Amino acid sequence: METQFELVLLLLAIAAGVTAFAKKLNLPYPIALVIVGAIIGLLPIPGLEELKDFFAEDEVFRFAIISIFLPTLLGEATLKLPFSHLRENRGPILTLALVGTLVSFIVAGLLTVQFLSLPLQAAFVFAALMAATDPVSVLSIFKSMGVNHRLSIIMEGESLINDGVAVVLFTIAAYQMSTFIEAGPFGIAMGLFQFFKVVIGGLLIGGLLAYFFSKLTRFFDDYPLEIIFSMLLFYGAFFISEAFHVSGVIAVVIAGLIFGNYGARIGMSPTTKLNIKNFWDVAALVANSLVFLMVGLEIMRISLWDKWMYIIGAILIVLASRSIAVYTSVGFIRHIPRAWKHVFNWGGLKGSLSIALAFSLPSSFPMREEVLVLAFGVVLFSLIVQGLTIKPLVSWLGVQTGGAALSSYETILSRIYRYTSGKKRLEKMKDEGTLSPVIFRQLGGKYEEQLNDLHHQLNHLYQQNPEIQKEQMERAIKEALYAEHEAVDHLSSHHLISDQVSDEQRKEIIELLEQEKEK
């Protein structure tokens, strides 16, 4: 155990060093880690042979990725993702994550059977592995380039849901597909039933646990304890779901969304929210750093070079299936710029989840080694070639946001929100009798002066950049209409208005929302 712990510390030290170096040079650290891991795996470096042997073991790699790192990465991503962002972009997110993933799975499976001559089951297992996307490196590039925030939200939202769908498809293809094939036409119904059972089961377990822990936080104002609650939630949702043979990935995703939105609203103080966010930021950085370094180490132990023609064919199939999936699924969605669709397509990188799932295949699985080789080859191409070319593509397509003007707007907006929140807190303290009126007038007056100055700056910015004002006007109208809808729900739930009136009011609000979308 002591030796294994030392190896983990050594791996963490290497990962931290590479990550720090990449961040200092403003490079995508996941890609740097994969390359360094591949170099370490390829070259006989004194002192690192034991490290390579330990982490290259199939069981160690699969357990670390799926059981340790995956709940952390999914939980962190969903915990800080506002539900309002998902709601506003639910159309493209769900279309890409559900329709796009299914199209990619079917097309890749059929093309693999046709052109690589794999048996039907092995082909669709490979297709399920390639349906999962891992946009970590892409999103880190987006952040450094100031890419449109909505584009990032759609890609992140797609990946979170897509991972759960891909794992369900993989499980069905790897362990139950032969049964469904033998059942003939009835097998399609059996497959659909199994799919929905696994998905709905994950949603129920994750949702119930998140609701329980959200309510639990109301009884405590102790951020170390509430951080422990979040850990128990994510890992509990994952392992309980897996024990019941439903989707642990989907359970963690829904748990993180509920706990990070509903739980944060009803039971977390500002101090708790900040500390939970900081804790999971660190945990996600550690997990990502170790994951991508381990991927690089693992790739080099698979003999890819004597099967390069086979791998090129697999790469072309995966690129073609992703293209067909993206352009058919979001091709008819309005308000999605054409340039964004190209970014969705090329930015759908494959990563550690694909490799970990591939290693989970039993040794008795037919064509296991061939599936492993294909999966590793595509992941290596995806992380390095697509990962290194996404930045030039984004620059060429011009999908960055409004540059200096938008940055100034966000700075002004954040200061207005800060000062308004501070002023409201002082007012509450004065009303409670814990702050004297004299001190309130002094501090409140300073806030008032700062807010007046910021409002003048904001009006000037709107005059210089009318497109920003238009975008914010549209957003404000939507938020107001959402609030109106919630108000009608409140009246209806308390039996203050009849069902007929509430239905009429909801219909009127929905019509107004549709009109806003058509503008």
Image: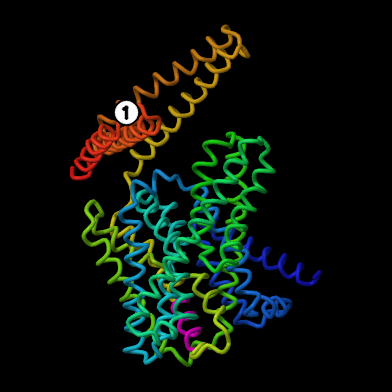
Q: Position of residue 12 (x, y in %)?
A: 67, 64
Q: Magenta stretch mostly in which secondary structure?
A: helix
User: Within 10 Å of the Cα at label 1, are there few (<14), some (14-19), or many (20+) other Cα atoms?
Assistant: some
Per the image, label 1 sits on a secondary structure element best described as: loop
Q: Report the front residue among 267 and 455.
A: 267
Give the vertical position of 347 relative to 362 (above or below).
above
What residue is shown at x 50% (from left), y 47% (from top)? 258
Q: Is residue 257 left or right of residue 500?
A: right
What residue is shown at x 59% (from left), y 34% (from top)? 269
Q: Report the front residue among 326 and 36.
A: 326
Q: Position of residue 490 (x, y in %)?
A: 38, 32
Write down the region rendered in magenta: 369-380
What residue is shown at x 34% (from left), y 44% (from top)? 403
Q: Which residue is mark 1?
A: 497
Q: Position of residue 105 (x, y in %)?
A: 36, 75
Magenta region includes residue 374: yes
Residue 28 seen in render: no
* Residue type for callout 1: Ile
Q: Is residue 293 left or right of residue 483?
A: right
Q: Quadrant of residue 109?
A: bottom left
Q: Position of residue 248 (x, y in %)?
A: 54, 63
Give the vertical position of 127 relative to 149 (above or below).
below
What residue is shown at x 36% (from left), y 23% (from top)? 455
Question: Which quarter of the figure is the N terminus placed in?
Answer: bottom right
